[in-house]
Amino acid sequence: MKIKLDLAPDLVAAMAAEIAAGEKAVSAAMRVAGADLKTSWRGQITGAGLGTRLANSIRLASFPKSGESLNAAALVWSNAPVIVGAHDTGPLIRSKSGFWLAIPTPAAGKSTRGGRITPGEWERRTGLRLRFIYRRRGPSLLVAEGRLNIKGRAVASKSKTGRGVATVPIFLLVPQVKLRKRLDLARDAERAVDGVPGLIVAKWVEDLF
């Protein structure tokens, strides 16, 4: 009596199904890990008081773009890497020309292009001239002769008698600034990476049941 046992077709099918389940689990896990990291980074940025605009610079892309793969990956990045990176590392900032860094006071207002206004733009906008005042202790100053409007901004005085005209500090001048570290993006990234194996297992088991 002869008995023939052929398991090859079922084994091949079982392995193919297991690979497909693995591809689905890995792809789903990477999408979840990437989305969680994007949310964490955005939360850090808004929590540090840096605003939703900078937080929304954090983006996510999952690979492959379509379908599933055992080599699936997620990429989280910022469209404003210089700004985000500066708050993440807390660098020492010096003037490129080796002179002063001009830090605007509230009286300077904001740039029409967004961000900090420069001394040159301020003079062009107001028509006033800035005057340098050196101080041995504390930051030196760039000041102007004018008045403060109702918004607290320095503007040219229209008074012919000079009434209300004052010397207003417009910029503080310092040789360098140490930016305070306000973010810890690596912490959340490491946490996301450490959680990937557990996510893959959870997604794999979820698909089985």
Image (spheres, grey):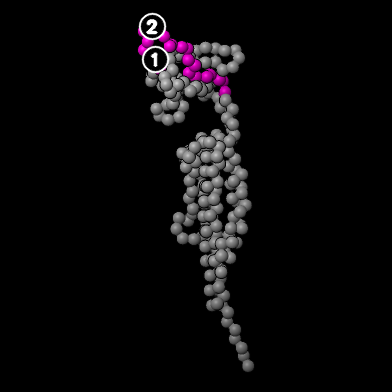
Q: Is 179 placed above or below 31 here?
A: above
Q: Residue at x 49, y 41 (%)?
A: 55
The secondary structure type at the circle numbered 1 is loop
**Mark before the other along the chain sequence, 1 or 2:** 1
Q: Is residue 118 left or right of 183 when viewed as pictured?
A: left
Q: Is residue 2 magenta?
A: no
Q: Of helix, strand and loop, which one carries label 2?
A: loop
Is residue 120 at least partly visible in the picture? no
On the image, the x and y values in percent for residue 25 come to 54, 61
Examine the rendered structure and indicate whether residue 21 appears above or below residue 82: below
The image position of residue 187, as x and y in percent, is 61, 44
Residue at position x 63%, y 93% in the image: 1
Residue toward you, 2 or 166: 166
Neighbourhood count class around disc 2 (C-alpha, 10 Å): few under 14, some 14–19, many 20 upward:
few
Q: Please give left or right for residue 132 compared with residue 2 in the image.
A: left
Q: Disc 2 marks which amino acid?
A: Thr
Q: Which residues are magenta?
A: 155-176
The magenta stretch spans residue 174: yes
Q: Looking at the rendered structure, which numbered label has been put on residue 161?
A: 2
**Residue drawn at point x = 57 percent, y = 30 percent:** 179
The spot of residue 100 in percent (x, y) is 53, 19
Mark 1, residue position: 156
Question: Is residue 156 visible to the viewer in this orientation of the structure?
Answer: yes
The residue at 49%/22% (across/down) is 105
Q: Amino acid at mark 1?
A: Ala
Q: Quadrant of the C terminus?
A: bottom right
Q: Nearer the viewer, residue 154 or 206?
A: 154
Extreme-top residue of the structure: 161
Furthest residue toward bottom: 1
Q: Position of residue 6 (x, y in %)?
A: 57, 82
Count residues near mark 1 (Cα–Cα under 10 Å), then give few for <14, some for 14-19, many for 20+: some
